[in-house]
Image (cartoon, helix red, strand yellow):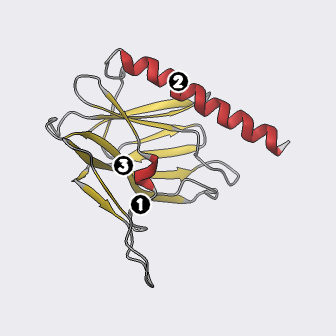
């Protein structure tokens, strides 16, 4: 039973990514209505808030190791920069749950989409990382979602969209 559930979740995630790839090819900003930074949206059993205060950086450095080892870090590729978008996610359901199948996209004013970097999230310092696994009912998790975008883009008029397959979506204008 558990194996079938995991397969279903993975299949849903793959379909969502495929759908977003096709949608992203059209270079269109998601249709409104748009939430402003700081406004909350209910998507299924999740209360999600994207706030203002995007951090812009050329590299992401992880926590300093406690003993020996080297500090993890990821540098943006040539002509690119990381946009770290602050989010708050609360489980408003009645059971512990994970928000692992959600797809987060950042759009520029021209409609080009950028997927959240999963490798970048693993390098974020623990103070900035938002774990969306095993969130208890009523629990809120805060942190940053990393995106890599072209450095020359205007830092205004960005849109971030979360899609939870088979549940719903929300879009914020930053």
Alpha-carbon neighbours of circle 1 within 10 Å: few (<14), some, or many (≥20)?
some
Q: Are marks 2 and 1 in contact (CB under 8 Å)?
A: no
In the rendered image, residue 39, in percent from the top left (x then y), is placed at 36, 43
Q: Residue furthest top?
A: 26
- Picture quarter containing residue 160? top left
Which quadrant of the view contains residue 155?
top left
Task: Identify the mark nearer the N-term, 2 or 1.
Answer: 2
Residue 127 % position (x, y) = 40, 68
Distance of mark 2 from mark 3, alpha carbons?
Answer: 20 Å
Q: Quadrant of residue 27?
A: top left
Q: Quadrant of the N terminus?
A: top right
The residue at 27%/57% (across/down) is 59
**Which residue is pictured at 64% across the width and 59% down the height?**
136
Look at the picture and state if 149 lies above or below 21.
Answer: below
Nearest the viewer among 127 and 43 is 127
The residue to which callout 2 is attached is 18
Question: SS at mark 3?
Answer: strand
**How busy is the neighbourhood of tag 2: few (under 14 within 10 Å), some, or many (20 plus)?**
few
- Between the C-alphas of marks 2 and 1, the distance is 26 Å
Q: Which mark is residue 87?
A: none
Q: Residue at x 59, y 25 (%)?
A: 15
Q: Which mark is residue 123?
A: 1
Q: Which residue is mark 3?
A: 146
């Amino acid at each position: 039973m558990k194996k079938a559930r995991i397969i279903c979740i993975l299949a849903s995630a793959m379909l969502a990514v495929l759908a977003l790839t096709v949608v992203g090819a059209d270079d269109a900003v998601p249709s409104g209505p748009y939430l402003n930074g700081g406004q909350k949206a209910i998507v299924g059993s999740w209360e999600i808030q994207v706030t203002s205060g995007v951090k812009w950086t050329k590299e992401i450095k992880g926590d300093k190791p406690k003993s020996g080892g080297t500090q993890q870090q990821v540098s943006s590729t040539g002509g690119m920069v990381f946009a770290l978008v602050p989010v708050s996610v609360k489980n408003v359901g009645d059971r512990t749950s994970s928000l692992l199948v959600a797809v987060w996209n950042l759009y520029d004013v021209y409609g080009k989409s950028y997927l959240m970097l999963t490798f970048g999230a693993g390098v974020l310092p623990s103070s900035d990382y938002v774990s969306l696994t095993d969130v208890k009912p009523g629990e809120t998790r805060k942190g940053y979602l990393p995106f890599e975008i072209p450095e020359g883009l205007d830092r205004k008029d960005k849109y971030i969209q979360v899609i939870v397959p088979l549940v719903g979506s929300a879009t914020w204008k930053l």
